[in-house]
Image (cartoon, coloured by chain):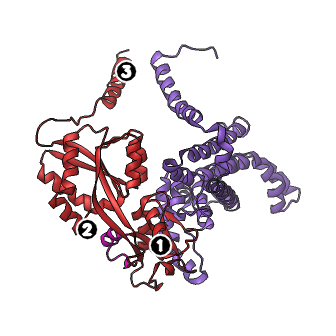
């Protein structure tokens, strides 16, 4: 399509918008303590935050896959009353302010929560202030991304491949493993990457539900928030790490698996 | 064409309105008037709520807006140029930090003192009697983050009591920390006496013995970048005057 002239006003507004996104990144890069970056990242608080973030985000992604793929399957393929409502509930955490999610999780799974009190009474299981709690908080916000991506893929694949496999005698599990899964693999990977990135960046739900416990629930975003006023170099170093990770995710997904 | 012109004009008008000079004017009149923003440590929330109303009754043309948070967060914001006319912090170190950033006008004044207390669930089910009891295995203790005044004071109290503090979950402000006990999520917290008084009913208190306890000294000062110096100074003066002091006393603060 030949290039058409863009109205001047649109260009002006577009430039302002781009600057709005680029300037903060430039600011971060400019104020970064490049000379002692390694030292900052070797600080025990920082190392704990990196470790907790890694464990929790990977844990949340695994849970999202284990529970999210079956959920996506049910939403895509099953007909049942209340399916629309179920779908809306699954999408809700994507739109809900994360801190509200944290409060809701707290009221459900806190030590005196609706369900949480039984966890505590029967099993002595407590989620707040534990790494498990942080994983739950991150799963809550991240799983919808995976479910939506996989559900769309499941709706989009051609049923005839699976039907052909069935007529050739493949069992359900074989059909899923050898036909469906390879067909949805790109979307599954993209959904998992999105969920992982979302889990890594979660703050509001983590701090409200899991609390702030160095070495157990203090993820990178929490550490950045706390370091911001007393140890700004540490906050900037951690921010750089998160930004680099986000860029890697974005670049690797772009064009190949996700139209971003 | 005229639609585009109109849109552009609206856009420009919005920019100008948003970026224009603030409405608060610094007045040289004898009576303070106008708006002031007071950035105050979160432990002052209830007391200053009352003080704000009293101050506005005393000087009817004034409006006081409060910005409560951890002293360290507020100091960082003010040092970076966030709007504020008065700063009341929970320790002198944070006020000194603001002073180093050349954001304090005049000299800070100590206007109140506070002490620490252990907060436990009503009925004290964990049978906590001393600071040492709070670090027993099986007791879930939360403290204020070590970066904020409340956290520093708490660690000092434990040091004086000779009790080693294991890694514990931390809250960002004293109120945040106390809420963990009030909500039943933690068994014990070390916060200010005034916080416990404000949360009466939701938590029970266990006294810390005097020789371990720490005295928190609260300074207040006018912020250098204030746009309403007259009202700001009047507020600072009010805090050290009889009515201000008696309100503070009512909420559990000690005399400066």
Image location of residue A189, percent across then percent down: 73, 48
How many other residues sit within 10 Å of disc 1, few (<14), some (14-19) or many (≥20)? few
Q: Residue at x 32, y 58 (%)?
A: B218
Tell which subunit mark 2 falls on.
Answer: B
> In the rendering, what colour is chain A?
purple
Residue tagged 1: B160
Q: Residue at x 38, y 19 (%)?
A: B4
Between marks 3 and 1 in the image, the one whose residue lies nearer the viewer: 1
Asked if residue A139 lies left or right of residue B152, the reply is: right
Mark 2–mark 3 distance (CA, rounded to whole Å): 53 Å
The disc at residue B8 is 3
| Residues behind callouts 3 and 1 on a single chain | yes
How many other residues sit within 10 Å of disc 3, few (<14), some (14-19) or many (≥20)? few
Please tell me whether mark 1 sits on a helix, a strand or a loop. helix
Residue B250 shown in magenta: no
Q: Mark 2 touching mark 3, by CB under 8 A?
A: no
Image location of residue B94, percent across then percent down: 40, 52
Judging depth in this view, the residue of B118 and B10 nearest the camera is B118
Mark found first going from the N terminus, 2 or 1: 1
Q: Quadrant of residue A125?
A: bottom right
Magenta residues, as a range?
A: B192-205
Residue tagged 2: B251
Q: Which chain is red?
A: B
Tell which subunit mark 3 falls on.
Answer: B
From the image, which quarter does the N terminus of chain A lie in?
top right
Mark 2–mark 1 distance (CA, rounded to whole Å): 27 Å
């Amino acid at each position: 399509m030949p290039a058409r002239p863009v109205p001047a006003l649109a260009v002006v507004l577009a430039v302002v918008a781009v600057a709005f996104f680029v300037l903060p990144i430039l600011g971060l890069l400019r104020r970064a303590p490049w000379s002692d970056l390694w030292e900052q990242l070797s600080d025990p608080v920082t190392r704990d935050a990196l470790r907790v973030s890694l464990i929790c985000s990977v844990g949340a992604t695994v849970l999202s896959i284990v529970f999210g793929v079956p959920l996506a399957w049910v939403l895509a393929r099953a007909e049942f009353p209340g399916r629309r409502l179920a779908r809306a509930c699954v999408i809700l955490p994507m739109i809900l302010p994360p801190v509200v999610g944290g409060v809701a999780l707290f009221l459900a799974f806190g030590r005196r929560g609706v369900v949480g009190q039984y966890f505590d009474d029967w099993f002595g299981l407590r989620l707040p202030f534990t790494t498990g709690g942080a994983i739950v908080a991150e799963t809550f916000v991240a799983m919808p991304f995976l479910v939506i991506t996989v559900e769309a893929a499941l709706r989009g694949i051609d049923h005839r491949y699976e039907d052909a496999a069935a007529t050739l005698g493949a069992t359900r599990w074989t059909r899923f493993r050898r036909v469906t899964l390879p067909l949805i693999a790109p979307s599954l990977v993209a959904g998992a990457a999105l969920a992982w990135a979302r889990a890594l960046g979660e703050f509001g739900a983590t701090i409200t539900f899991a609390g702030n416990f160095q070495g157990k629930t203090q993820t990178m975003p929490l550490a950045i928030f706390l370091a911001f006023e007393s140890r700004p170099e540490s906050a900037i170093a951690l921010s750089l790490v998160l930004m680099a990770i986000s860029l890697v995710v974005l670049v690797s997904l772009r064009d190949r698996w996700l139209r971003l | 064409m005229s639609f585009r012109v109109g849109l552009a004009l609206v856009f420009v008008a919005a920019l100008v309105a948003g970026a224009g000079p603030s409405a608060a004017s610094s007045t040289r009149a004898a009576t303070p008037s106008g708006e002031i923003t007071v950035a105050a440590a979160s432990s002052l929330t209830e007391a200053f709520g009352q003080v704000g109303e009293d101050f506005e009754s005393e000087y009817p043309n004034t409006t006081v807006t409060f910005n409560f948070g951890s002293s360290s967060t507020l100091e960082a914001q003010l040092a970076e140029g966030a709007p504020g006319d008065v700063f009341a912090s929970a320790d002198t170190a944070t006020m000194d930090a603001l002073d180093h950033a050349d954001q304090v006008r005049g000299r800070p004044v100590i206007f109140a003192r506070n002490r620490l207390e252990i907060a436990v669930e009503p009925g004290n089910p964990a049978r906590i009697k001393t600071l040492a009891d709070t670090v027993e295995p099986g007791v879930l203790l939360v403290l204020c983050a070590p970066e904020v005044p409340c956290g520093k004071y708490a660690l000092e109290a434990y040091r004086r009591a000779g009790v080693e503090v294991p890694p514990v979950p931390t809250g960002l402000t004293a109120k945040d920390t106390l809420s963990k006990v009030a909500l039943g999520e933690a068994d014990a917290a070390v916060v200010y006496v005034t916080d416990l008084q404000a949360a009466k009913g939701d938590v029970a208190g266990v006294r810390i013995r005097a020789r371990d306890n720490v005295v928190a000294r609260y300074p207040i000062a006018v912020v250098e970048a204030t746009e309403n110096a007259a009202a700001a100074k009047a507020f600072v003066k009010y805090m050290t005057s009889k009515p201000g002091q008696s309100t503070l006393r009512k909420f559990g603060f000690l005399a400066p």
